[in-house]
Amino acid sequence: MNKKAVGLDLRADGWTVLEVVRRGRTGLDDLEVVNLARGKWEPKATPEARGEMLKAAFRQQKISRHGLVVSLPSGPGQWERPTLPGLSPPLVKTAFLADLAAKLSRPPEELALACKIRPGEGNASEVEAFVYPQQAVAGYRQILHHAGLRWFSLLPRPYGIANYLLAFSGHLRRDGEQVFVVEISPLETEVFLLGREGIIHHRSFPSPVTLDGAYNLEALAEELKLTRFHLRKHRGAVNPVFVYLSSPFAEPENETVLNTVAAGLGLDPDRAAFFSSLRPPAGLSAGEWEQPGVLAAAGMVLERLGETGSGMRLSLPDEKEPPGKREFFSWALLLLAFLLGVGGLFFRFDTLRKERVFLREWLQRQEPELAGVRRLLAKEERLRKKMDLYSGLEKEGQFFFTFLAEWERVVPPGTIITTLTLEKGRVSRLSGQTPSFSLFYEALLASPFFKDLQVMEGITTNPEGLEVFHLSVPAGVGRGDERTR
């Protein structure tokens, strides 16, 4: 029996939908693409207009609305993979949410969460999670609502790409091998490390562009070097053997881009290739396979068909299961369930009375165990406070290191810091001496990290001929670590 699935890749600049049918019982060789549609949003288009655009595509190409898996862009979200002490799964999730709320300064009830807990080394537990603001998820759900799409699962976009690579990359199929994945777009650049256990490291950042709007490859190389440093610091030994790349550059620039990415990640250029080198599903031409979003949509299809999958579906607080897993029942089955429910209702009251008596007696016998549970809860609260403290200290250290790395990258030689004030995760005041303040300030303005610093006092010249400056961030400017994320 044939089975269909639909993958929909939503991005900030457009969308791609892929409808796939599985002709046989199992196996990737039995998959065939029967529909492909894609489009771009107008920058100021409303959710209603975007939804109508999707609805027209589904209607005109007769794309199925069942078995739909939707990917959301990474930009609004944040990937986390901390290691926590060996506790029971409910306590691990509680500890993770408490640490997350302290780190993001946002209560858990305002977040949509895709989460998976894995056993770590010893008795530790490793939590992998992708966190989205509810407001961002609600915006994309509004688009889907106006498109007439009601039943779907939501996944962060990197898991669509990861699913396809896990199924078709020869490097990942070999034990112990890991690959880098770099996806460049005009708006956002994503870098993640992928292994057989899934995503090992992930970060996304706004694409670095020059003043004339061109993509800054030198800035990309520095970002990739920073990624390697983060991996060595936080993950220890890693073994990447290859890098897959997607970019919007014209074909004459492809070799330059490929060499830049390989060098930034510490790999030989012959260990790098574009997404198009992966085997496409049957039914797609080479030109269609190279279009943005097609690979992510294909990975969403694999998630639905169960060929390979992350299981990292986004869900809102108190949502028992993500939309898309509910199945439609026939009216006959619903009627039968209703009749059985009415029949069983008459026998339920006496059962409930007996259960209440049993539970009351059981609770009285379990009083010593309940006292032990209360002690464990008190211990959990103490551990949570320690985790909050350690998380804050680690975040301050990470921000200071990021400041030093960015300072070394953009500031002209000969500049000296005399006063530096870091306050609440940002540079609030900076004083120093430089051979040329105009060159120094121009370099700062070109960096997203320092662009909010403004001259607060006059520029003077000291006896050594150096220009003395005093810069500060005006009140109300956002935190520096969020701008550079």
Image (cartoon, rainbow, N blue to C red):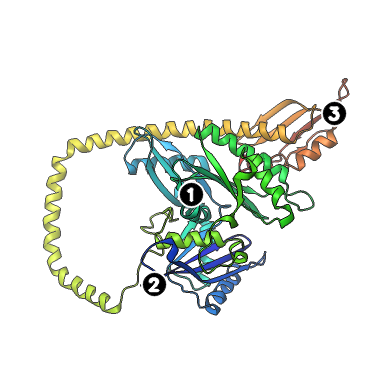
Judge from the rendering whether residue 311 lies leftward or rightward of residue 470; answer left or right. left
Q: Which residue is mark 1?
A: 130
Q: Which residue is mark 3?
A: 435
The amino acid on which the numbered mark 3 sits, given as a three-letter code, is Pro
Q: State which tag comes first along the sequence, 2 or 1.
A: 2
Residue 208 at least partly seen: no
Q: State which tag comes first along the sequence, 1 or 3.
A: 1
Residue 420 occupies quadrant: top right
Quadrant for the C terminus, please: top right
Percent of width and height locating residue 426: 64, 37
Whole-Å distance between the Cαs marked 2 and 1? Answer: 33 Å
Percent of width and height locating residue 319: 39, 57
Q: Tell me the SS state at disc 2.
A: loop
The amino acid on which the numbered mark 2 sits, given as a three-letter code, is Asn
Residue drawn at 26 percent across, 79 percent down: 332
Q: State which tag comes first along the sequence, 2 or 3.
A: 2
Percent of width and height locating residue 170: 49, 50
Residue 118 occupies quadrant: top left
Residue drawn at 61 percent across, 47 percent down: 272
Judge from the rendering whether residue 180 lies leftward or rightward of residue 222; answer left or right. left
Whole-Å distance between the Cαs marked 2 and 3? Answer: 72 Å
Is 101 situated above or below 390? below
Residue 30 at least partly seen: yes
Query: Callout 2 environment at 10 Å: few (<14), some (14 to 19), or many (20+)?
Result: few
From the viewer's side, name the closer residue of 454 and 268.
268
Whole-Å distance between the Cαs marked 1 and 3? Answer: 45 Å
Q: Which residue is mark 2?
A: 2
Quadrant for the N terminus, please: bottom left
Q: Tell me the SS state at disc 1.
A: strand
Residue 382 occupies quadrant: top left
